[in-house]
Image (cartoon, coloured by chain):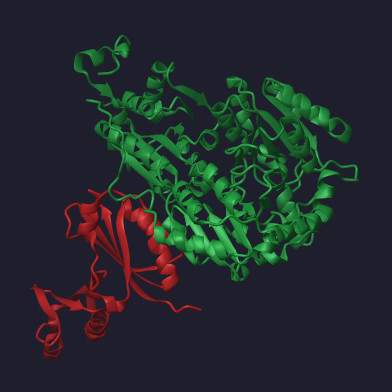
């Protein structure tokens, strides 16, 4: 036994050298390097919480105010650190409350292990109190899941869970543990998992594909790179930067790719997709070679597939073979670990600069600046814009902050205007579009990188979906900065209603409470800004604070986010107004 | 528009609880109807084999294979066209004993892969096997006698091209 120090509390371990399943779960977590987890206790997981109590000096458990908050906090933690986030909940409603976060982690490839308690094995299927088939429910939204019914399975399954969550294309894993297995005593032995025979996390690199890709890239006159989160998940930021700097290829990002490359980098040409920049969207349909790196051609990125980059040769760097040809037909698929494949192709590509092609992006930028950006950042009207707030946050944080955004107009504005110097700094719910993500994710992010500034940017609608996590912030004293951009509307839906439903504002207007009073109820320093002249100072004051802080900014009620590719339209048909 | 056709999907998996759910969920998510399904042991110890029959375009069946293959406990997934497989289905027909000595029924059983596998005072049971059309034909012929019960299996299929699972597992191990 390696835990002789614990024996004073647990006389049984001395006599039998056996430990309970519940204690084994904690030991497994420690073996996997977990020192922080998020969760919410309940009947079916009480034995594990009892062990957490004993191990609290080694394993810090954060009590969120809702299980969904636990998953998003674990996701925020995972996204800023690159480590596996851990969330824990009881059976039944505790487990079902995890589902949104699990689905979010699945579609955004976030490594997460969720542990749920389950009714005892002899009660399975009896409709016992708080019994739910979480294995069945979570199956379509997990990378893997497993129900443990005896303690002896715990070490192997926990090791496998962490291995699967973090390897290859990461994702969420759920381990459901029946209560009898938590109580059961057994001989504990841990062995790290290094392979699963039916699972190949990283496809082998094929040098012939790399050579073929390099040839096409070297011949390209108008190449365009679109990079996604794969660059971050593959820890390939340096290789990526070296590749684009040598080839001189303009590089655009998906929202999850944001921050993999500094926003000020001269080859960074901005965001693709529905509310992305004018240049990279329009020029997607003019490039001769489209190089997709660690991205999956989401419909919000491509718009109408029948008119997407039809003129271009498509090269796809990808770890997941199922993504190849899923949405866009690829000419050359470069499968493998992007850190390796980019390092290899770097040796084969020519040094280039593509100046006249780059100029086309600048020309498009000038048009977008005139029609959109100028009015967003330097408005002439009285009402505050969301972009102005982001601008002030950039000024105050110098682009060094982690920005956690929620879902909606404010998210698009935050991604469009926030400055990033470092990778793993843009934390947002991309694929699932989970409103309520940001507040708990910011808690996890700040705990993951306590030395960095973490600013949550949230709309008034999203904020109220997980507002109870203010309780977690109050209890843990985690110094996150919360900015609510309040337009008293579900802004993005309202924008669509205005543009596509003849301004029929069905259920999008919000009668909001006094957010400052609510934040003060949780003993947070809280302020509200309504005038432009107060904004900069208010943001500076928030950033200067060493504690949790709440800032509400009343923004223009009916502003729209542009540019915009209407749903189903071509990237060429991007609208500037 | 690419034409839909029948594909037989063969999936080799680990023998764990819940895989059926995980695999069928992939079809469900894409709103694809499963025409038939069979689960059994395979030629390899502790490896299970799923046989799904679906009607879809080749482009989509390829995507489905990618998603199936991606599941942790799937060792390998393949798809084959009708030409690439040898397949079989089995059906059982329960018919009232009054027709047992009907010469026409006896005649129908001749020259076909069908025979009587049980006879009791009240009923007898015919087993037929073959291609889907063979069973469809037998069904039409026996229907007039009043079927007390009818059941047919999903397709089982052997591929003409090699599915090198043993080699694959050897390589992994």
Q: In which quarter of the image is the C terminus of chain A?
A: bottom right
A145 up-or-down from B75: above or below: above
Q: Position of residue A153 (x, y in %)?
A: 27, 35
Tell which of B66 and A217 is nearer to you.
A217
Which residue is at 54% across, 43% downward?
A237
- Whole-percent x and y of residue A460? 72, 39
Closer to the camera in the image, A376 or A345: A345
Residue drawn at x 71%, y 31% as measured from the top left: A397
**In this rendering, position of residue B48 left or right of residue A236:** left
Q: Residue A476: horizontal and vertical position, in percent?
A: 58, 21
Left or right: where does residue A549 sit relative to residue A351?
Answer: right
Query: Image quarter for residue B158?
Result: bottom left
Residue A564 can be seen in this image = no
Q: Chain A is drawn in which colour?
A: green
Residue B40 seen in render? yes
Residue B161 image point, x, y percent: 25, 71
| Residue at the extreme top of the image, as rendered | A8
Which residue shows up at 26% across the image and 34% down it?
Answer: A150
Residue A339 in the figure: left or right of residue A31: right
- Tell how many labels: 0
Residue A159 vertical position relative to residue A213 in the rendered view, above or below? above
Q: Nearer the viewer, residue B69 or A261?
A: A261
Q: Of B144 and A529, which appears nearest the observer?
A: A529
Position above or below: A228 against A438: below
Q: Which quadrant is the N terminus of chain A positioned in?
A: top left
The chain letter of the red chain reads B
Q: Which residue lies furthest to the front in this view?
A: A351
């Amino acid at each position: 036994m390696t835990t002789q120090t614990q024996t004073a509390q647990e006389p049984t371990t001395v006599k039998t050298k056996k430990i309970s399943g519940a204690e084994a779960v904690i030991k497994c977590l420690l073996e996997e390097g977990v020192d922080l987890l998020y969760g919410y206790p309940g009947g079916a997981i009480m034995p594990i919480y009892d062990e957490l109590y004993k191990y609290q000096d080694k394993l810090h458990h954060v009590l969120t105010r809702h299980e969904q908050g636990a998953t998003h906090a674990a996701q925020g933690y995972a996204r800023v650190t690159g480590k596996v986030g851990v969330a824990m909940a009881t059976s039944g409603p505790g487990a079902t409350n995890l589902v949104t976060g699990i689905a979010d982690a699945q579609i955004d490839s976030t490594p997460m292990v969720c542990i749920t308690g389950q009714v005892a094995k002899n009660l399975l299927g009896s409709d016992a109190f708080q019994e739910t088939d979480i294995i069945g429910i979570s199956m379509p939204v997990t990378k893997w899941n497993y129900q443990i019914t005896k303690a002896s399975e715990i070490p192997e399954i926990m090791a496998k869970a962490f291995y699967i969550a973090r390897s290859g294309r990461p994702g969420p894993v759920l381990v459901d543990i029946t209560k009898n297995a938590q109580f059961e005593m057994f001989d504990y032995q841990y062995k790290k998992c290094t392979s699963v025979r039916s699972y190949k996390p990283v496809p082998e690199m094929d040098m012939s594909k790399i050579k073929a890709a390099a040839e096409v890239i070297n011949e390209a006159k108008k190449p365009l790179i679109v990079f996604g989160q794969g660059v971050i998940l593959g820890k390939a930021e340096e290789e990526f930067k070296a590749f684009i700097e040598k080839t001189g290829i303009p590089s655009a990002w998906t929202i999850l790719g944001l921050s993999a490359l500094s926003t000020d980098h001269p080859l960074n040409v901005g965001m693709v997709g529905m509310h992305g920049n004018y240049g990279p969207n329009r020029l997607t349909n003019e490039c001769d070679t489209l190089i997709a790196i660690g991205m999956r051609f989401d419909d919000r990125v491509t718009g109408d597939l029948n008119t997407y980059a039809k003129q271009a040769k498509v090269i796809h760097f990808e770890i997941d073979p199922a993504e190849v040809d899923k949405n866009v037909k690829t000419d050359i698929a470069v499968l493998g670990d992007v850190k390796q494949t980019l390092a290899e192709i770097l040796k084969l590509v020519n040094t280039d600069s593509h100046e006249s092609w780059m100029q086309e992006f600048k020309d498009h930028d000038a048009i977008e600046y005139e029609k959109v950006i100028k009015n967003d950042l330097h408005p002439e009207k009285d009402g505050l814009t969301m972009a102005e707030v982001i601008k002030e946050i950039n000024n105050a944080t110098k682009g060094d902050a982690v920005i956690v955004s929620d879902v909606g107009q404010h998210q698009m504005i935050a991604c469009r205007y926030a400055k990033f110097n470092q990778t793993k700094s843009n934390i947002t719910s991309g694929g699932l579009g989970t409103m309520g993500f940001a507040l708990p994710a910011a808690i996890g992010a700040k705990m993951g990188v306590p030395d960095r500034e973490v600013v949550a940017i949230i709309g008034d609608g999203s904020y109220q979906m997980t507002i109870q996590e203010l309780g977690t912030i109050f209890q843990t004293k985690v110094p996150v900065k919360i900015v609510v951009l309040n337009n008293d509307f579900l802004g993005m839906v309202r924008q669509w209603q205005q543009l596509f439903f003849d301004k029929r504002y069905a259920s999008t207007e919000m009668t909001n409470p006094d957010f400052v009073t609510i934040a003060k109820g949780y003993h947070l320093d809280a302020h509200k800004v309504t005038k432009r002249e107060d904004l900069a100072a208010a943001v500076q004051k928030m950033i200067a604070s060493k504690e949790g802080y709440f800032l509400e900014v009343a923004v223009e009620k009916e502003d729209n986010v542009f540019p915009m590719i209407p749903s189903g339209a071509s990237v060429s048909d991007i609208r500037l107004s | 528009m690419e034409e839909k056709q029948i594909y037989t999907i063969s999936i080799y998996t680990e023998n764990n609880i819940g895989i059926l759910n995980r695999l069928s969920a992939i079809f469900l998510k894409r709103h694809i109807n499963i025409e038939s399904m069979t689960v059994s042991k395979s030629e390899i110890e502790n490896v299970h084999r799923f046989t799904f029959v679906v009607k879809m375009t080749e482009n989509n069946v390829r995507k489905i294979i990618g998603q199936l293959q991606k599941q942790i406990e799937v060792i390998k997934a393949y798809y084959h066209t009708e030409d690439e497989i040898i397949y079989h289905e089995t059906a059982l027909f329960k018919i009232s004993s009054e027709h047992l000595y009907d010469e026409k029924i006896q005649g129908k059983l001749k020259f076909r892969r069908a025979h009587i596998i049980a006879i009791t005072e009240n009923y007898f049971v015919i087993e037929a096997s073959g291609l889907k059309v063979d069973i469809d034909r037998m069904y039409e012929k026996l229907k007039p006698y009043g079927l007390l019960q009818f059941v047919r299996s999903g397709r089982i299929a052997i591929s003409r091209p090699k599915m090198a699972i043993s080699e694959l597992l050897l390589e992994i191990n």
